[in-house]
Image (cartoon, rainbow, N blue to C red):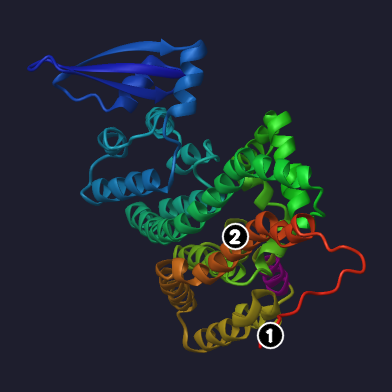
Amino acid sequence: MLKKVVLTNIHTARSIPVIVDTDDDQKAILGAGKAPNETAVVTDIVGVDEAVHRATTKAPGKEEMVTLFGGLARCLERNISTIKSLELISGRLSTPRYRGVVADISQKVLEGERLSDCFAMHPDLFTEDIVALIRAGEESGQVHEIFRQIARSNDKSQRVLKKLKAGLIYPAIVLVLSFVVVIVMSFTLVPAISKLYGAMNVSLPTATKIMMAFSQILINQPYYLIVPVAGLVMLFKYWPKIYRIPRVQIALTRVPTIGNIIRKSAAMVSFRCLSLLLHSNVRITTALEISARASGHVEFEQFFLRVREHINDGLSLPEGFLIESHRLGPDGRMIAGVVQMAGETGGVNEMLDQIAGDYEEELDLIAGQLDKILEPIMIVFLATIVGFLIYAIYGPIFNLSKVILPKKPGQPVPTAQTTR
């Protein structure tokens, strides 16, 4: 349930509305970050208003997670109590979901629940690897350090993802403009040309027939335009679920450039997660299982689970990496060699973190050059679209001479006459 908390400054009488996703008024006030010099009035948002707010309100993201764990790390490091730290950090959060979660965690901690169990009650925001790290921090007494590592890791991943998304803006604009141009021409130019060609009884190329058929569909049944638009909306909305399908992941991995980015992203996330878990003294088999789920890719998940099986059979971590290195793609042999060297010299977790850092730098470089990498593909795509349109529209013109200047049977070809 959404609750609207109106915070009013008792000195200036200025009011600020804050939306909190919770089922309790006290939690709503806590999640809104009420200051000592403010009064709070809570009202419920129900019905259509709630649906509109949920549809238009910013969704939880990694930025909020970085803010939450980074702020908690700074507060706990200065010996501020957990409950007070949560109260202080709630005012810095910007999404209703995170505000409500922080308020709920604060209340559960006040009731005597373990901090890790409180985070585990919200699996949609805090995955199993994060909960395992918090549990390890509680056992070692280094919760603030774990929070700092979680914040740093998510911040690095978020920066890379932002650059990748920014690099995809140009291709997205090109695709949208191409689609709009085809639609506009199908409504305007193609119908006029089709009448001209139809009146002259000219044989039309296949491309022109396709354009004319497409134009007729859009003119007579314009509601068909809803189909591709709805398809794109559904694709973006349910893409996380679609991407979890193993066949989709494997197919995308085989695509040039895109497959390389997917592999490096999965390697960066999974190896950093494994490094953090091992650094927090989490049992190695448990760390491998959690890293498998955190990787988000079926091939890396199989890799970590197979390595765990080898360890259960009595092999070491470097040996397991070496046996299953083929599952990591072209870089698998190199990664196995690095882990094997780290196993001999010590500091496997540091070496895994270095591997994750190397992948992060590579992804950062790719993200900065993504528009240049995709530019040749976009040029080929645009050339194909433009060439198809030009051929479809101007191709029949070359056949007009047969209608305008028909050749009579038996008529000799005129030749140039010379004068004496």
In the rendered structure, which disc, 1 or 2, sits on the residue that comes first in sequence? 2
* Residue numbers of the magenta segment: 302-312
Q: Which residue carries the number 2 mark? A: 386
SS of the residue under disc 1: loop
Q: Which residue carries the number 1 mark? A: 418
Q: Which residue is found at the position 62% from the left and 46% from the top? A: 239
Q: Which residue is found at the position 59% from the left and 81% from the top? A: 331
Q: Quadrant of residue 336?
A: bottom right
The correct choice, above or below, for 130 with respect to 401 in the image is above
The correct choice, above or below, for 87 with respect to 135 in the image is above
User: In the rendered view, does 177 fall on the left or right side of 318?
Assistant: left
Q: Position of residue 403 (x, y in %)?
A: 78, 55
Residue 404: numbered disc: none
Q: Position of residue 335 (x, y in %)?
A: 56, 81
Q: Pick whichever, 362 or 147, lies toward us.
A: 362
User: Which quadrant, please, contains the C terminus?
Assistant: bottom right
Q: Is residue 371 visible?
A: yes
Q: Quadrant of residue 222?
A: top right
Q: Position of residue 249 (x, y in %)?
A: 68, 60
Q: Amino acid at mark 2?
A: Val
Q: Amino acid at mark 1?
A: Thr
